[in-house]
Structure formats: C-alpha cells, structure tokens
Amino acid sequence: MEVASAKEGRVWESTTVIAVAGVVAAVFLGWCYWAPLMSLVERWRGDDNYGHGWFVVPIALAILWQRRDMLAGFRSHPGILGFLPLIALLAFRYWLYERNELWIESATLPLTAAAFTFAVGGWGAIVWAWPALLFLCFMLPLPPSTNNVLAGSLQTIATIGSVNLLHAIGMAVINEGNVILVGGQKLEVAEACRGLSMLLSFATLITAMVILVKRPIWERLVLLASIIPIALACNIIRIAVTAICYAKFGGEVQVVHDWAGLAMMPLALGFVLIEMKVMSWLVVEVDVDEPRGFIRATYTHDPGPRIFTQDPGPRN
C-alpha cells in the first residue's frame, strides 16, 4: 500500500509540474504573439472576407473536447528535448519580426501551438490534438498575392456564371468585364460580390463538419471536394437573382442584394444536405453479426432491414 501511495504521489507531483509549466509557457507564448493576435482580430473585425475567424478557436476547442476519450490513461513525460522545436519556432518568429514579414509571422501560430502541445504532452498529445491544430489554419488570412489572384478569378467566374444562368432562363443580358448589362442598365459585380467571403466561411464550416461528424472517409472527402463548386454556385445564384430584380424594379434592389447575401449560407447548407442524402442512397450497410447462414442488408433508403438466407455449407 505504501508503494502504491508513493507512486500515486509521484504521478500527482508530475502532473502538477506539467500543468504549472504549461500555464507558464502559455502565458509566455501569449505575450510573444500578442501583436500578431491583435492584428488577426483587427482583420476579422474590419474585413468581411475573414469574419469567420472569430469561430475558429471555439470550434478547435470543440474538436479537442470531442476527442477527450483519447486522453484516458494518458501519461506525459516531457523532457528538455521536447521544447527544442518550440524554441526554434520562437527564434524563427523573432527573425521574421525583425524583417517585418507580418503574414509569415502570423502563419507560425498553428505551428507554435503544435510545438507547445508536443513539448507538454509528447507525441500522444499530438495524436489527440492534430485535427484541432490543423483547423487553426482557418484563423489566418490568405497571403496577399494569393488573396488578390483568387479574388479576381472569383469575380470573373461569378460574372460569367451568372450571365450564363440568366441566358438559360431566357433573359437577354451581356457582360462587359465585370459589368452585366440588364435591360440597358449596368449592374456591376463589385468586389463584395465576388464570393471570397462565402468560399472561406463555407470551407471553414464544412471542414468543421467533416471533423466533428462521424461519417465514412469517402463521404468526408466528397464533402471537402464539393466546397468550391457549391460556394461558386451559391454566389452565381445570388448575382442572377439580383440581376432579375434589377431588370424588373430598376436600381432599387439593395434590399434584395442584402437578403440574397444572407441567404447564401443556408442555400449552401441545403446543397450539402442534398449531397449527403444522395450519398446515403448509394450506400448499402451490411451487418454480418447475424447467426450463421444469414446476412442482414440494411439499405439507408429502406424503412427496415431485409434478411437473406444463404447456403451455410457443409457441417461436420
């Protein structure tokens, strides 16, 4: 009994030391990254394209909470070598700060969080936390060059797509660059309508769903692959609806434009639900836990299971 008590005492003491060291390191990292974090907060507040950044950390915490069962029986044995990646990243971050590389400096945040997790908990903690650590990348803005190229491409695609959709429903419209001519009037597809905000927000939402909702791997991959097509389709529909109202009611369509923007996310989620329903029709779940000689085939679109008999083979 005394030996067991001594072991429990050492485990409690080790856990306490780890917790104290983790709190001290977290406070130090918060002080080091205070300026980049405040820069991100200002970006989330002032740029509609990155307003989803407010939800990234709460969702990452939800991911960690959902995977908490992986910590059952977990014991951390941190050592000085575990802190080397963290020290190296902090030195690299200081080098970036001195050279005013603001975006790359902010981009080291998820890596630093991963290095901190490794320093405190080792590889076991990394295995537990890696989906949440990867999800933290959504809190970062795109690199300026990528942001400009992607935004311009999305604006062009939105204009051409909406014009083709309007042609398909019989409206006589043409486009000149990013301007749509509707009934002799000009409707500009402005930067706010290019769909970058929709794309980034939708990508964040679907990625969170893929991580948090238990689905087969192939369905998760299909959902991830559908992020860009669905986001583009929703933005094209939004512009087309605005153009139709513009043709019928003239220039007083700001209310329609705003409401169409608010409806983009529910429309995208509707497309996702349809996509998941179609995938469920394509899947047949087979339960082989029945007694010998029977197979239970459960069709996801069928109200009940069907039992099929098969030849059990010769018996000895």
Image (cartoon, rainbow, N blue to C red):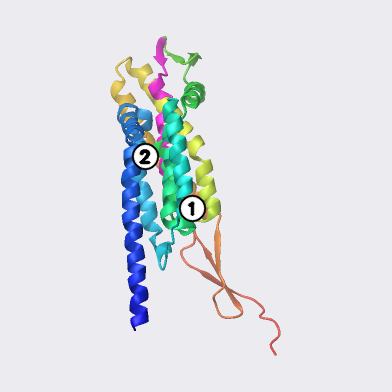
Residue at 45 percent across and 37 percent down: it is: 91
Quadrant in the picture for residue 97: top left
Secondary structure predominantly adopted by residues drawn in magenta: helix
Give the class, few, some or many, for how many residues have Cα within 10 Å of label 2's Cα (few <14, many ≥20).
few
Q: Is residue 271 visible?
A: no
Kind of residue at disc 2: Pro
The location of residue 197, given as percent across then percent down, is 40, 30
Label pair 1/2, CB-CB below 8 angstroms: no
Which region of the structure is painted magenta?
Answer: 185-208
Residue 108: say if magenta. Answer: no
Measured as percent of width and height from the top left, residue 17 is found at: 34, 60
Which structural element holds mark 2? helix
Q: Secondary structure at mark 1?
A: helix
Q: Is residue 204 magenta?
A: yes
Q: CA distance from mark 1 to mark 2?
A: 48 Å
Quadrant of image for the C terminus: bottom right
Query: Label 2: which residue?
Result: 266
Q: Quadrant of residue 287?
A: bottom right
Q: Residue at x 52, y 56 (%)?
A: 216
310 relative position to 275: left or right: right
Q: Residue at x 41, y 63 (%)?
A: 71
Spot the residue most to the bottom: 316
In this view, the mark in front (1 or 2): 1
247 vs 279: above or below? above
Q: What residue is disc 1 on?
A: 81
Q: Position of residue 106 (x, y in %)?
A: 41, 34
Residue beneath the point at 43% across and 39% down: 90
Residue lying furthest top in this view?
184
